[in-house]
Amino acid sequence: MKSGTLTSRSLKSRRRFLGTAAAAMAGAMAALTGCGKNEVEAFLQHNFRELSKDELRQVIARLEADARRKYGREIRIGLEPAQQGVIFGYALDLSRCIGCRRCAKACVKENNPSRDPQIEWIRVLQLNKEEGVDVSHADPYYNPEEVPQEGHFYMPVQCHQCRNAPCTKVCPVGATWQEPDGMVVVDYNWCIGCRYCMAACPYGARRFNWGEPAIPAAELNPVTHYLGNRPRPKGVVEKCTFCIQRVRKGLYPACVEICPTGSRKFGNLADPKSEIRYILENKRVFVFKEELNTKPKFFYFYGV
Amino acid sequence: MTMAMLRSFLRFAKDSLGHICLGNRYYYAWIGFLLLLIAAGSAAYLGQLRDGLIVTHMRDQVSWGFYIGNFTFLVGVAAAAIMLVIPAYIYDWEPIREITILGEVLAISALVMCLCFVMVDIGRPDRFWHITPLVGRLNFPTSLLAWDVIVLNIYLLLNWFVVTYLLYCSYTRRHYVKAIVLPLVLFSIPMAVSIHSVTAFLFNGLSARPFWNSAILAPRFLASAFCSGPAILLVLLQILRKVTSLKIKDEAIFKVAELMAYTMGFTLFLTLAEVFKEFYSNTEHLVYTKYLWFGLQGHHTLVPYAWGSVACGLAAFLLLLMPRTRTSWVGLNVGCVLIYASVYIEKGMGLIIPGLTPDPLGEIYVYTPSATEILVAAGIFGIGFLVFTLMLKVAVPIMLGELTVSPGAPAQHS
């Protein structure tokens, strides 16, 4: 333990020194290159997990100003931390889901993904009842007049927030990690856009900003979290965070709230009396691609 | 002492630069052509910087493509160029030093291209410093990409140092210090193996992609690289001994060709082993292999590449295996070109794309490189050939003792 404290302290002092050096360098570089001070500061910004409180304040002020410039609106970028004794978990009832995709739409409204190019974090698969959960027969582009369609069932897929996450393991710069309350998050200002995490994810849950993200100003959700739904830049990866900006304030994720059939269940895995624990202990539950040992905190079950 | 060394090194650098600028009109035409390629690639890349990677045909479903395929192929070339040093030592070929230098120049050029391909593939090249050890936050040892960054850079520095040192010694007409060179050259051999193994492990370790998640991926990489790297060198050695007074024995060339035949045979065998396992066991993982070899749900984009690569490989294997065709210059050179084509197609089209198609949720997104991707790749090959040409322009006369500290006097050979 002792050596751990020492290391983290020496790391902190090194970071502090680097921080001062970076601030000095930012001024010099702004003068030399003719770039704005903001751009230089953005360029030199370090990983979220290594920023001091002061640096974080500055970063957030800058990012909020960026959003004001781009969308002409005031947004708030929150930093709500994980609560002690909370590990979020999700369960989805395949016997109830009707494939209406309201979850995917509510997610877009809440989480500020680009509308053009279009990004959606939830992908609903239409599967054949005869084939069962076999993605080689999946159709994500189904578009009938009415759902559910005869002979089919629906399986929404989003980030499984794996405990043994292949995506965070492969990131070459530590731009994605698992928070203490279980969400796998991305630092959009540290990601280099190599997309190794996308190759590693067995659930196809990560999205890349292939072009400059565009959101109509009126549709921008101004209530955001640094690690969640704040507006993203071009060239970085993003993903579902269980609506970190909501759940850390005690709200349900947007997809849970909107679901008209009550197929989506969410709660604290660490609380033995929670609904999610009841489901895991009493229902017929399965884990998608269980053989990969990713240990998701997202479960599917058959409620009826 | 140090001042004198610095002065003579500066003179070495100055003479080298001067020599680069002089050449006949074929030389200028070639350089001009490469500069044109680079200009076209740069223009395409500027468009990509402005609009984002959306100008490529990569998408969330197939998130890596032509750039990473080229990167993988060139890591193989860089590795194999040095592995050629092994037989040179074992068989005690006469121009060991020359073959070593040529191999290293090829390795350096290939590595420069590798780093360029990584740079053009990432979404935020402005954040490249994040991956720099100590300054950024390199996720070492957990991320295989972090490993790759480290081994590729060490390998680049190593080769750059050895080749500069050898040439500098020749230039100053001093014999190189064997105690410095030999350990470094020997060290570069395991490094060569490691750059290609690490690059294979980078794909290999992903359980989400069954097509790559196969234990013979790294051996396949090494075997195929051992064919393609020397194929380039063999053609080059023939050209060099024709246009300069560099002497390379026929036997050396034939011996390398024979080794290439065996490794090509082994590569084909490993491919067969993979295909057998997938088709006979017929699990849900077969879809990727099927997409590559026969197409899936009416999509056959990769099929001609897959069979074309094997056909080239098989023909080259036979040409280089039979002594009569191997020792005829036509047979040998056709064999080399076929090997190069076979491995390039396999790494460029047959490795990355079927690894990612169908995507983890079963969707088939048909990927083929966009015009931007092809132009940018052409530009990077332009950079690589330029580095290669300029380095050889200096290296060859120095090796031959024509370019030394006092022109006219022969270099002091061992």
Image (spheres, coloured by chain):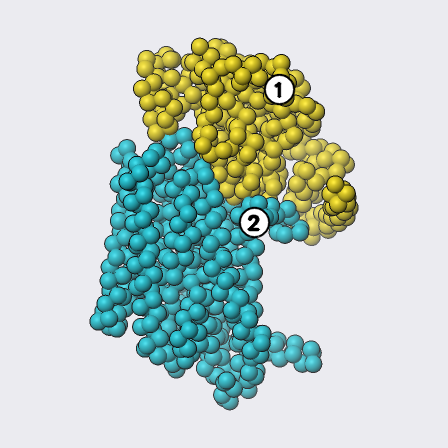
Task: Give residue B414's position: percent from left, percent from top.
Answer: 50, 84
Q: Which chain is yellow?
A: A
Residue B186: tell me if it is visible: yes
Q: Is residue B301 above or below residue B36?
A: above
Label 2 to label 1, Cα distance in Å? 35 Å
What residue would you read off at disc 1? A268
x and y percentages locating residue A99 in the rendered image: 42, 16
Residue B231 is situated, as x and y percent measured from the top left of the image, at 35, 65
Say which residue appears at 70% left-offset and 40% top-offset.
A50
The image quadrant where one finds the N terminus of chain B is: bottom right
Q: Secondary structure at mark 1?
A: strand
For disc 2, the marked residue is B146
- Name the foreground residue: B153 vs B84: B84
Mark 2 residue element: helix
Task: Say which quarter of the image contains residue B246.
Answer: bottom left
Q: Amino acid at mark 2?
A: Ala
**Residue at screen point 34% across, 29% down:** A136
**Above or below — where is B105 with respect to B4?**
above
**Between tags 2 and 1, which lies in front?**
1
Crowding around mark 2 (Cα neighbors within 10 Å: few <14, some 14 to 19, many 20+) is many
Direction from residue A125 to residue B261 in the image, left or right: left
Vertical arrangement, residue B180 with respect to residue B143, above or below: below
Q: Quadrant of residue B326?
A: bottom left
Q: Colour of chain B?
A: cyan
Tell me the kind of residue under disc 1. Answer: Asn
B396 over B268 or under it: above or below: below
Q: Circle 1: is it few (<14), some (14-19), or many (20+) Cα within 10 Å?
A: some
Say which chain tag 2 marks.
Answer: B
Tell which residue pokes out farthest to the bottom in this image.
B409
